[in-house]
Image (cartoon, rainbow, N blue to C red):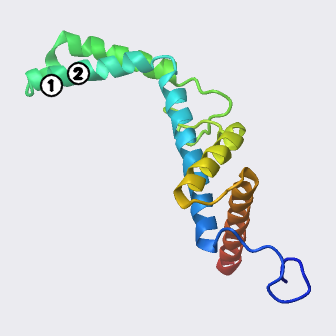
Amino acid sequence: MGRGGKRAGAGRKRILSDEQMIIVAGACEERLNELWEQARDHAFRSRPGYGKLRSAGSRIRQLISKNPHNWEKTDEVHRLQETVQDAIKSMRHTPSWVTRSNPLFPRTAPRPYRRKHEIIAAISEEYSERWGLTLTTRMVKRCWDEARKYRKEIAEEESEGEV
């Protein structure tokens, strides 16, 4: 069904093509995933024991490069191994939002949904400049929501086909 007006082609014309809508939605998802990756890295690096583990690992690499054949027999390596084991024990404590799929080194964090408005505003500004069109934040949000809706429909169709 057309948008407004009685005759064919009446009403508001679309500002974005289907391809442009997909590009905008993809850019939003990409930006959200970048923020999510940053949050996961921060959560992982801020865990107790991470600094000890990292410094012990770099020191072990130095020892291996100095003496590649007999590096395992030194007392320093045994001390570093104990340091690594202590660091791993302290890193095993997992926050409540961490999944249990990899309890030793979970690299998950909550998705940064609170920053969606910031993402939408940035994408709106970026693509308005790039394409020379006026992309409102409402239009970008609609593109993102429709893309998610279509992705969900496709996933449901694929799951029905497997049954």
Answer whether residue 106 is visible to the viewer in this image: no
Q: Are marks 2 and 1 in contact (CB under 8 Å)?
A: yes
Q: Which residue matches tag 2? A: 60
Q: Residue furthest right?
A: 6
Q: Which residue matches tag 1? A: 64
Q: Secondary structure at mark 2?
A: helix
Circle number at residue 131: none
Q: Position of residue 134 (x, y in %)?
A: 67, 57
Vertical arrangement, residue 13 with respect to residue 42, above or below: below
Vertical arrangement, residue 160 with respect to residue 145, above or below: below
Q: Secondary structure at mark 1?
A: helix
Q: Position of residue 74 (x, y in %)?
A: 16, 14
- Quarter the N terminus occupies: bottom right
Q: Position of residue 138 (x, y in %)?
A: 76, 54
- Quarter the C terminus occupies: bottom right
The residue at 41%/17% (across/down) is: 51
> Foreground: 105 or 29?
29
The residue at 20%/10% (across/down) is: 75
> Foreground: 100 or 45?
45
Distance Cα–Cα, label 2 vs label 1: 6 Å
72 relative position to 162: left or right? left
Q: How many marks?
A: 2
> Foreground: 23 or 60?
23
The kind of residue on which mark 2 rests is Ile
Binning the other alpha carbons within 10 Å of mark 2 as few (below 14), some (14 to 19) or many (20 upward) gives some
The kind of residue on which mark 1 rests is Ile
> Foreground: 114 or 111?
114
